[in-house]
Every structure is written in structure tokens, then in C-alpha cells.
Amino acid sequence: MSELYRIVLIILGFVFVGLGVLGAFLPLLPTTPFLLLAAACFARSSKKFYNWLLNHKVFGSYIRNYRERRAITLRGKIISLVVMWLVMGYTALFAVSNIIVSLILLLIGAGVTRHILSLKTIK
């Protein structure tokens, strides 16, 4: 692997970590896919950053549980769904004046809800 390719993967890894962190606060931006992409970039470019991400206090167990068991904690499911529906519901009902956009938001919410509920629950 060339040094340039390795550097590009490291940069992309940190971009994906940043997007994953933003996704923890913005309901339409997914957290897990970006963190998984970051882990894949780091796994191919830097053992140090890969280990840092998997051992991260907040995101490490989240990534490992999702990758190894396709599972999430009950608390994680509840918080994710409540926050997502509060923000998306408010946005669809009060912030967007176009009914089509509101319906699209609600359909996205339904899809994300289905995905979250399909994951195993860690007790």
C-alpha cells in the first residue's frame, strides 16, 4: 500500500468519525454507518487509530456490538427513537411547509425505526 493511499484512508477515517459524532446529535445523519466506515478505513491504514476507535470510551462498545452481534442496548434504542421522533416529528409538523417533504421525513423515520427495532437488544 502506498503512503499516499494510507494517508487518504486515515483522513477519510477521521472525516467519518466526525460525521458519526454529528450523527449522534442530528437525527437524519446516521451514526453507526459512519463509525463503521471509519473503522474500515483505520483497519486498512493505521492499527493505532483502529485500536483507538474500537477502545473509545463512547463509541468503542457501540461499534463492537453492532459489528459482532448486530445489537444495541435497550437504552440506546429508546434514546435513539425518542430523540429521532421528537426532532423529526417537530420538523415534519411545524418546520416544513411542504407536505411531500413532511411525508418523506416521516417515511425516513419509519425506516430508521424499523432498522433499530430489528437489531438485537443487549440486556
Image (cartoon, rainbow, N blue to C red):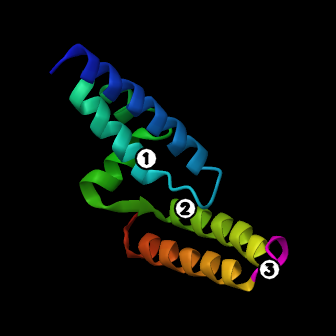
Do the numbered discs 2 and 1 sit on residues whose CB atoms are within 8 Å?
A: no
Q: Is residue 106 placed above or below 16 in the rendered structure?
A: below
Residue 72 spot, x, y in % from top left: 42, 60
Please name the residue shown 45% across and 70% down the image. Answer: 116
**Which residue range is magenta in the image?**
93-98
User: Residue flagged by tag 2: what amino acid is it?
Assistant: Arg
* Closer to us: 120 or 99: 99
Do tag 2 and tag 3 residues touch (Cβ < 8 Å)? no
Q: Quadrant of residue 61?
A: top left
Q: Using a 10 Å C-alpha cutoff, classify the residue at mark 1 as few (fewer than 14 neighbours), some (14 to 19) or many (20 or more).
A: many
Q: Which mark is residue 93?
A: 3
Mark 2 and mark 1 lie on one chain; the one further toward the N terminus is 1
Q: Which of the marked residues, 3 or 1, is nearer the chain's N terminus? A: 1
**How far across and down, in percent of the image, does residue 88 sit?**
69, 70
Identify residue type, mark 1. Answer: Phe
Q: Is residue 31 above or below residue 100?
A: above
Dot label at residue 75: 2
Q: Return the x and y of residue 49 as percentages of the image width and height.
A: 35, 24
Residue type at mark 3 is Leu
